[in-house]
């Protein structure tokens, strides 16, 4: 029964949502209700993830495992942000709201932006080392990348006014064609996988062995 | 190690230092490189400019701090245009970090005298990714309280808004998934809303097919899109200055790639 019940739920919910997209009628109201449930389940998943983080990093901290200070930083940040965020959401005063926003603007924002900015340096170094004309395919990719980079930068227009036109063409035509092919392929794959899940042939989402 | 081998293996610290220099200098002393306006930006501007005062636009803020340097300037530029025109803005987010960007945008205008709940509102984060987008798209009442804890039904800006068709426009500011694909798949297709995109540069290739098909009416692409929008508005700001730095950064990367390849060929010939 531990397997059959989730499979039946998956089938019934999947069929309702699938057919609600195809036919007018009461199924649409049921589908809308079910998607609302998923939002609630997703919210619980966030809570569950927080509990899990506490459990894993709390254990690492108590046993002073290597890197325990990272676990400490994570737990402190989790508590501080959760408490202040909750107080702000529950209608805290102006000071709490400002503190909540400032914590974000001064800590998470700059840290995230710094991580992203550091990527530029790694990308520059990696591009220099990896972009070599070793084969015809690599040469095509290299030329396309350089033309797009230079065409999208204002300085490219100063060098030659056709660079932006070439970059636009590369993005609009070959890129769009390739992306569309990938999307259609992925959609067909997703449909096939969904069908297998609905019919109970794919059981990976139930966890454990197949 | 001979010269050719050295050219193939330039110490990464040299690349880093050069990149820091060429990106930092234009930020301190802008070069004011000319920037042409792409047709997509003009189209985006025209669609927004055609809105009437009192219309309400939905911002879907689907990005995190990592993508913010590329996407947030677009949201800020479009917000400026909308506030100038007297168009109201409601924001929602399907990324947990999104609501804080909504607050950043709105607090600036609150300081200028605009009123929260009347000119703009932040509905916060809705968990559930693609399913949440579908649910919210069909029923805005999915969100009962805004990010500041107010009942959504008490906000004057939300009067008469039941689903996303009641917004004059929906603009997805996006740095990945869930984002534009999910909006097109779950809401634009079924409800026929007018959807625009403000996309991070790396996300542009994924968004282009939807722009090409007309499902996304227009797109602003990355920091350059923000800079172009500022110019079209006639209010050049921080994004325009940052484009100089991006230009020189690109040139340094291209130069290193070219040097690496020349050395590679010289080495192969020997």
Image: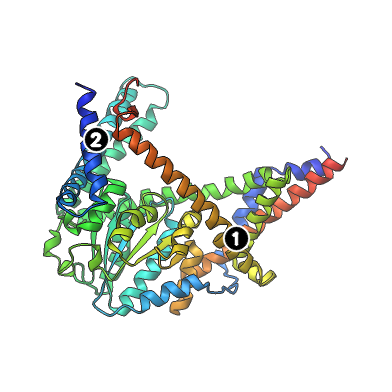
Mark 2 or 1, nearer chain start: 2
Residue A11, label in figure: 2
Quarter of the rendering occupied by the N terminus of chain B: top right
Disc 1 marks which residue?
A170
Which subunit holds the residue at mark 1?
Answer: A
Task: Give the color scheme: rainbow, by chain, secondary structure or one colour.
Answer: rainbow
State the image coordinates of residue B20 (x, y, percent, origin top left).
Answer: 59, 54
Q: Kindly indicate the quadrant of the structure image that contains residue B75.
A: bottom left
> Residue A59 at what x, y percent from top left?
30, 23
Residue B65: image location, x then y, percent: 40, 52
Is A195 or A77 nearer to us in this picture? A195
Q: Are marks 2 and 1 on the same chain?
A: yes
Closer mark to the observer between disc 2 and disc 1: 2
Residue contact at pointers 2 and 1, CB within 8 angstroms:
no
Direction from residue A197 to residue B208 in the image, left or right: right
Q: Is residue A5 above or below residue B191?
A: above
Marks 2 and 1 sit apart, C-alpha to C-alpha, by 43 Å
Instruction: Report in which chain the residue with disc 2 lies.
Output: A
Residue B60 position by quadrant:
bottom left
Q: Nearer the viewer, residue A209 or B260?
A: A209
User: Which of the numbered marks, if any, corresponds to residue B75?
Assistant: none
In front here: B171 or B17? B171
Residue at image point 39% right, 41% down? A190
């Amino acid at each position: 029964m531990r397997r059959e019940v989730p499979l039946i739920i998956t089938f019934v919910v999947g069929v309702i949502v699938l057919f609600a997209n195809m036919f007018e009628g009461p199924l649409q109201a049921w589908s809308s209700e079910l998607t609302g449930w998923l939002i609630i389940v997703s919210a619980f998943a966030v809570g569950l993830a927080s509990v899990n983080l506490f459990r894993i990093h709390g254990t690492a901290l108590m046993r002073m495992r290597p890197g325990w200070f990272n676990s400490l930083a994570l737990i402190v940040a989790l508590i501080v942000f959760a408490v202040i965020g909750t107080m702000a959401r529950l209608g805290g005063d102006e000071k709490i709201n400002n503190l909540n926003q400032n914590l974000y603007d001064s800590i998470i924002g700059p840290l995230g932006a710094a991580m992203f900015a550091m990527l530029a340096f790694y990308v520059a170094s990696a591009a220099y080392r990896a972009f070599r004309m070793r084969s015809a395919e690599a040469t095509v990719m290299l030329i396309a990348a350089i033309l797009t980079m230079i065409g999208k930068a204002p300085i490219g227009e100063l060098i030659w006014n056709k660079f932006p036109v070439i970059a636009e063409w590369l993005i609009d035509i070959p890129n769009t064609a390739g992306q569309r092919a990938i999307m259609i392929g992925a959609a067909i794959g997703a449909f096939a996988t969904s069908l297998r899940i609905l019919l109970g042939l794919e059981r990976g989402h139930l966890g454990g062995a197949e | 190690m001979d010269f050719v081998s050295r050219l193939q293996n330039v110490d990464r610290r040299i690349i880093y230092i050069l990149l820091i220099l060429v990106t930092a200098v234009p930020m301190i002393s802008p070069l004011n490189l000319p920037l042409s306006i792409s047709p997509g930006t003009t189209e985006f501007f025209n669609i927004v400019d055609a809105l009437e005062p009192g219309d309400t636009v939905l911002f879907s803020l689907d990005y995190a701090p990592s993508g913010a340097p590329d996407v947030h300037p677009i949201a800020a530029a479009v917000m400026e245009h909308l506030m100038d025109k007297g168009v109201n803005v409601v924001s929602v987010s399907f990324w947990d970090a999104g609501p804080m960007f909504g607050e950043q945008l709105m607090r600036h205008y609150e300081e200028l005298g605009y009123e929260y709940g009347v000119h703009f509102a932040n509905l916060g984060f809705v968990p559930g990714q693609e399913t949440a987008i579908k649910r919210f798209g069909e029923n805005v009442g999915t969100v009962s309280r805004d990010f500041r804890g107010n009942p959504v039904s008490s906000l004057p800006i939300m009067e008469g808004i039941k689903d996303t068709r009641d917004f004059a426009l929906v603009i997805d500011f996006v740095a990945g998934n869930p984002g534009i694909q999910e909006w097109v798949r779950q809401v634009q297709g079924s409800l026929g809303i007018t959807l625009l995109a403000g996309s991070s540069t790396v996300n542009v290739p994924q968004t282009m097919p939807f722009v090409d098909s007309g499902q996304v009416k227009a797109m602003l692409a990355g920091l350059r899109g923000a800079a172009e929008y500022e110019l079209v508005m006639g209010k050049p700001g921080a994004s325009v200055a940052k484009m100089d730095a991006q230009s020189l950064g690109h040139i340094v990367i291209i130069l290193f790639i070219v040097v690496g390849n020349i050395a590679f060929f010289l080495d192969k010939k020997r």
